[in-house]
């Protein structure tokens, strides 16, 4: 059974990924998030293809084991794995809650790594993995230290795994958007006035970002960055010294 899997599918760009991926030649789409009722609402509202709702916390080991069981049970052929689950929090690390900061690493890094590893045995030639990354992977962001570090991991993970999977003709793409007006900002505590940088930055459109990422993945690209402004930022991040950019990009 040809399937696509979208984690973090209950809001924001995850919903847009769900809507867009249904245009692909698939038998079923699996949507994963903790909020079951929200997933049901999204499926009822936007579902075109048969949809399997999987309400689970992917940071829990037993749930990853259950995920593998479901893949085996359904004889799954994963055509798209979209690792979209993640969150960030703004504020200096010295003032942060250590449990929350650790939970960010659990979801953004460990859970993504485990779910991807568990999925690889169910992927074949022509399959794609899309990892929702961030412009913060280009340069570290003060006051979002752990978040930007976690996204730097996602970027490195994407590039290395893509190289490993070339022989299997499976592509891996990092989507690196700038800020989007989604639940992410509220969860991160980023409201107007909290960060002058965030207030000034142009917003990326979640729908256009999802469409662009899927197209880029199918074309075999490694990184997709929406908006010319952020494409330019990605280039200068490779040229200018990190300390200078750290100060310029201060959140």
Image (tube, helix red, strand yellow):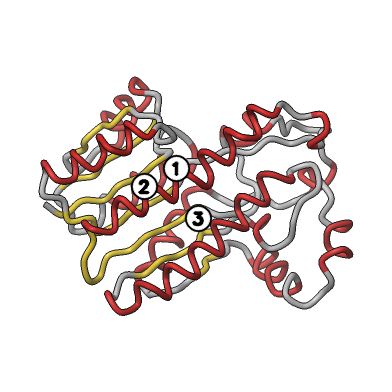
Nearer to the camera, 197 or 244: 244
Query: Which residue corresponds to the image point at 39% horizontal and 74% vertical from the top-left?
Result: 220
Q: Earlier in the sequence, mark 2 or mark 3?
A: 2
Q: Residue at x 74, y 31 (%)?
A: 191
Q: Which residue is mark 2?
A: 115
Numbered-mark total? 3
Instruction: Report the residue at 23% width, 55% height from top.
Output: 78
Q: Position of residue 174 (x, y in %)?
A: 50, 62
Q: CA distance from mark 2 to mark 1?
A: 6 Å
Residue linked to disc 1: 111
Give the SS element for disc 1: helix
Q: How packed is label 3: few (under 14 Cα within 10 Å), some, or many (20 or more)?
A: many
The answer to whether the residue labelled 2 contacts the one labelled 1, judged by CB atoms less than 8 Å apart, is: yes
Mark 1 closeness class: few <14, some 14–19, many ≥20 residues within 10 Å: many
| Mark 3 vs 1, N-terminal side | 1
> 43 or 237, which is in the foreground?
237
Which one is in front in this view, the residue at disc 3 or the one at disc 1?
Answer: 1
Q: Secondary structure at mark 3?
A: helix
Position of residue 134 in the picture relative to residue 66 (left or right): right
Image coords of residue 192 (percent x, y): 78, 33
Question: How far is disc 3 from disc 1 in space, using C-alphas?
Answer: 23 Å
Give the class, few, some or many, for how many residues have Cα within 10 Å of label 2's Cα (few <14, many ≥20).
many
Give the camera-side residue of 86 and 10.
86
Residue named by callout 3: 209
Percent position of residue 124, x then y: 21, 66
Residue pictured at 79% horizontal, 35% vertical: 91
Query: Label 2's element?
Result: helix
For the residues labelled 2 and 3, the Cα–Cα distance comes to: 23 Å
Instruction: For marks 2 and 3, give the one nearer the viewer.
Output: 2
Toward the viewer: 139 or 19?
A: 139
Q: Is residue 148 left or right of residue 208?
A: right
């Amino acid at each position: 059974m040809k399937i696509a899997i979208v984690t973090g599918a209950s809001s924001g760009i995850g919903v847009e990924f769900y809507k867009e991926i249904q245009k692909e030649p698939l038998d079923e789409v699996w949507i994963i998030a903790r909020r079951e009722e929200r997933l049901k609402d999204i499926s009822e509202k936007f579902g075109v293809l048969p949809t399997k709702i999987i309400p689970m916390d992917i940071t829990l080991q037993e749930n990853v084991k259950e995920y593998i069981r479901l893949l085996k049970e359904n004889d799954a052929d994963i055509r798209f794995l979209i690792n979209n689950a993640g969150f960030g929090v703004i504020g200096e690390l010295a003032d942060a809650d250590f449990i929350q900061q650790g939970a960010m690493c659990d979801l953004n890094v460990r859970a993504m790594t485990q779910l991807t590893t568990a999925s690889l045995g169910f992927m074949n030639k022509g399959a794609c993995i899309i990892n929702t990354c961030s412009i913060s992977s280009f340069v570290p962001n003060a006051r979002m230290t752990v978040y930007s570090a976690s996204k730097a991991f996602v970027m490195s993970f994407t590039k290395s795994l893509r190289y490993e999977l070339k022989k299997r003709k499976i592509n891996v793409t990092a989507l690196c958007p700038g800020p989007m007006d989604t639940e992410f900002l509220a969860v991160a505590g980023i409201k107007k006035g909290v960060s002058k940088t965030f207030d000034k930055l142009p917003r990326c459109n979640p729908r256009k970002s999802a469409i662009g990422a899927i197209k880029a993945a199918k074309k075999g690209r490694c990184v997709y960055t929406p908006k010319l402004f952020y494409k330019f930022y990605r280039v200068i991040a490779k040229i200018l010294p990190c300390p200078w950019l750290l100060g310029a990009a201060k959140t």
